[in-house]
Amino acid sequence: MHDGTLTRERLIREATKLVEHRGFASTSLSDLLSAADVKKGAFYHHFASKDDLCLEVLEREKDRFLEWLSRLLDAPTPREGLERFFRAALALHKKRRFIGGCLFGNIALETSDTSPRYAEFVEGVFSEWTAKLETVIREGQKASEIRRDVPPDVLAQVTVAAIEGAIMLSRLRKDDRPMKTTLETLTVLLDQPHKAA
């Protein structure tokens, strides 16, 4: 890897850390240059602006997240895939000590009213995430593993919304209980409802 590639990768790596912990608006170009130990001229050789760098960060994180999600959902049964995803999500945020939260959720909250470019990107991430869950839920309904009285797209959307809210609360409290309780409740929600005798 030549020096130019190393510099670009270092900028992306340090930008990812900063944006995850500080947010987009609170991360200045000076912060990025200092963290990556890069001069302004070298920065502009690789990126036209802070926006371009941050969108590259989001693109890479999107690819990594969706690959991770697909790997977890690829289980012997649809229900097992969903439960494996739930366990892995909780374990991931516990490992991070609930610092940083969800990068995409953070960006959505921070920029959705002010930056259509970011809002459109993050909406795409959530749409792909929801679509992957919808596919697995639909397969689970066909296999009688998941309740059939709620459409799969609705269950998928509720699942994403609940997980995002739980991540935020666990981050706020630095406590696993919001995420743990939410994921346990989602597991119950997916069950076939029992008919009254």
Image (tube, grey):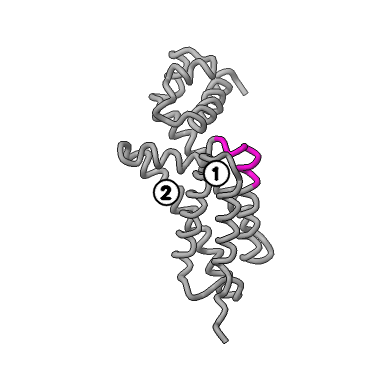
Residue for point 63% across, 43% down: 92
Label count reads 2
Whether residue 190 is in magenta: the answer is no
Residue for point 55% across, 48% down: 66
Q: Please provide the residue range marked out in magenta.
A: 91-99
Residue 73 in picture, x, y percent from top left: 61, 57
Q: CA distance from mark 2 to mark 1?
A: 25 Å
Q: Which residue is mark 2?
A: 124
Q: Name the residue at the bottom extreme.
A: 197
Q: Is residue 141 visible?
A: yes
Residue type highlighted by circle 2? Gly
Whether residue 95 is in magenta: the answer is yes
Q: 55 or 103, which is in the foreground?
A: 103
Dot 2 alpha-carbon crowd within 10 angstroms: few under 14, some 14 to 19, many 20 or more: few
| Badge number at residue 170 | 1
**Mark sitting earlier along the chain (2/1):** 2
